[in-house]
Amino acid sequence: MHNPLSDRRRPGASKVFLLLVLWGVCCQNPLVAHSAMENPYRRLVLGDPESPWRIQADEVTYHQARKEYQASGHVVIRQEDKTLSADKIIFSMETMMASADGNVVLKFGEDVLTAKRMELDIKNEKGVFYEGEIFLAENHFYLKGDRIEQKERYVYAAENAWLTSCDADDPAWRISGKKLDVTLNGYGYIRHGALWAKKVPVFYTPFFLFPVKLDRQSGLLIPKIGFSRRKGFEFDQPLYWAINDSSDMTLYENYLQKRGNKIGMEYRYALDGRSKGVLMADFLNDLEIDDGTPRSTDNWGYDHDVWDRSNSDRYWVRTKQDQAFDGGFTAKLDLDLVSDQDYLLEFLDGHSGYHASQKYFKDNFGRILDSYEDPTRVSRFNLNKNGSAYSLNADLKWYDNVIARKYLDEDTTLQQLPRVTLSTLKRQISKSPFSWNMNSEYTYFYSEDGTNGHRMDVHPRMYFSRYRNRYFTFEPSAGLDETVWRTDKFQDHPLEHGKDRTAFRHQYDLKLDFASELYKVYPAENNQSRAFRHTLIPRLVYEYVPRTDQEDLPWFESLDDEINRIQKKNSVAFQLTQFVTSRSVNLKDTPKPAPDGSPGVPVPQYHQLLRLDLKQGLDIDEARENGRPVLPLDAEMELICTDFFSIWADAQYSYYENAFLTRNMELKWQDDRGDRFHFSYRFTDDLIESLYTEIGVRLSDVIFVYADNERNLLDTRTLETKVGVLYDAPCWALDVRVKDNADDRRIEFIVNLKGLGEIGTN
């Protein structure tokens, strides 16, 4: 019997077809076919009412024998941020296969897939797209292919494909390949790939891996390629391993033509916001050493010290870890072990170089490494607990002096194993005008060839606070310092030769502190929402510490702290501190009314513009003994005019020498365009005088030029000079820079394919 509907075209019948598709794919709900007979632009709802599917089409034909629906004319299906449209769609109820032809567009949020033709296996959620293109908004990727196959729900494979992050039909760059595999929320992998600049091939790679989403996925990362005089050709390939939700690892294989293979690893974990850590390690069996011969020293040595580097086994191990415990305890571990004194200078750059490690530690832990030029590396374990009235710290500190460890017969480097401090906050005694606090410390000092022993110091302090009025404070105080030593070994003085194992020291000190605080508020003219406050804090402090005989007390070599030897003091210091603070209120951000109906009050914002600190001391004992009572003048200034400009400076000036003992200054400026200027000057009498200058200018929207120079003024030697030009296009960038330092000169070309990463050579 002939079905009267089999060849009849009905407006809106595509609603029936697409409801069938959605029923088979997503909802498994029965059809509501009678609604399809209505107006072709009336939308129908199927499935979960909280997330409905809405369908439109011009007409549909149903073939009962084949159980097949054909919809045509502006076919559109929508659900929330998902949309599928085409000129024609055919669906088979028997095979659960569907095909779309002509202007096929599939949208998921901001991601878009377009194709000339599409075939779908609805039951198995697979499909093939012909002459297709995928746009992934999160990475701003375009993937094109003659044939794109959806193997699984989020896995695609493409033939004769290419990818780019450029919007133009003729992209500035693209990477093409015969085959491309991509996993959404994962990585893309392309085989036999070529990098094209417009229509010119410039680079070939047998494989290429790139991230598709931000979710972590194991795989190869972008390699770095380079060439230098000391290392020859260099290829650094990282491999990323997503271990689990809380940890991952990156492995490095760094081939150095002249030096061998340097392997490295970074293991990272994050248990929660307060417990995290990273362990980094690099190893190199160096093919070249500096054994002191002229040729080896000229080619492989450094002139910053007199020592050779004769070891071929080279390494650098470093870690930083934070761990939170119950009861308010927190632990921090810093480890820094290096094989030789110039390893860090040799490997400043690269994936696992000093600069990359320093930046990672600073950004993620707020702690930095010692300077790469410092041969003494500090490792530390700290356990801390801060209570409402006290602070407890326990430290294990190990100073690894590479020079002493490798070259000297004796190593007197002093270790602190452990150092425990307990400090209490100043607390009032009942309702009296008296208050107290205490600082205490226990340390065990260990040195392989120096003095070893225990030291315990307790320093309680009593205060008498007397407030004349709200502008003036007078606070005398007295402290008692008790120190005891228990020595295991004296340097060059065995215990049996007359040295006491136990020693005591008793010391008191007095302090008188006068302070005041004056301020005035200046409202800004024609701006009721802004005001400035000028604060002036004068302070006069008298300190007295009597002279004490400490000649026979244990002496720990290279220890520079106030407890090792207490210095006598009989001085007066005048300090003047000034602050200028701005107060502003954004009337547009007025909070909503309070629950009781009272109007909301805007929260003011405070910004410190200026801090100026001057300190002048007078030594009364020096006046009596040498007639030179005036101590050096200390000054420090910080000026923050805007969010883009700041100046910091400090200095120490000696009247009797008529010269600066120290003077330092740093100036920073940057505008909204990215133009910047940085000037830094450092001076310490007979020790340091250096100058660092950096400038960057944006010549246009895409061209940025920059230069920096670091110079040692004591020996008139330029440490490093760098000049570069950055061409920053919307989807790619080219950075060309020339570096010149005392040991090497190089030219670097770095191409940044935005969304993928950098491909560089130097």
Image: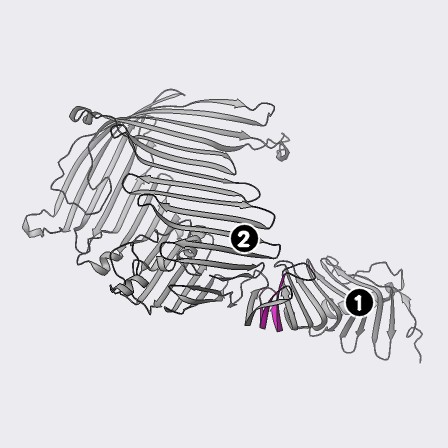
Residue 409 lies in quadrant:
bottom left
User: Please, what is the three-letter code of the amino acid marked with disc 1?
Assistant: Leu
Label 2: how many Cα within 10 Å (few below 14, some 14–19, many 20+)? some
Image position of 312 (left or right of 169) = left
Q: Nearer the viewer, residue 271 or 362?
A: 362
Residue under pointer 1: 18
Is residue 22 visible from the viewing direction of this image? yes
Image position of 488 (left or right of 513) = left
Q: Nearer the viewer, residue 74 or 710?
A: 710
Q: Which residues are magenta?
A: 168-196
User: Please, what is the three-letter code of the amino acid marked with disc 2?
Assistant: Leu
Image position of 64 (left or right of 523) = right
Residue 543 lies in quadrant:
top left
Q: Is residue 244 placed above or below 439 in the rendered structure?
A: below
Q: Residue at x 28, y 43 (%)?
A: 687
Q: Farthest residue toward the left? A: 497
> Mark 1 to mark 2: distance in Å?
52 Å
Label 1: how many Cα within 10 Å (few below 14, some 14–19, many 20+)? many
Q: Residue at x 53, y 63 (%)?
A: 216
Q: Residue at x 43, y 58 (%)?
A: 746
Residue 562 lies in quadrant:
top left
Residue under pointer 2: 726
Find out whether residue 555 is within the magenta segment. no
Find out whether residue 187 is within the magenta segment. yes
Q: Nearer the viewer, residue 569 or 170?
A: 170
Instruction: Look at the numbered disc 1 and give the secondary structure of its residue.
Output: helix
Residue 235: x %, y % from top left: 45, 67
Q: Is residue 201 placed above or below 604 in the rendered structure?
A: below
Q: Farthest residue toward the top? A: 468
Mostly what secondary structure, the magenta segment? Answer: strand
Residue 723: x %, y % from top left: 47, 51
Instruction: Look at the numbered disc 2 and give the secondary structure of its residue.
Output: strand
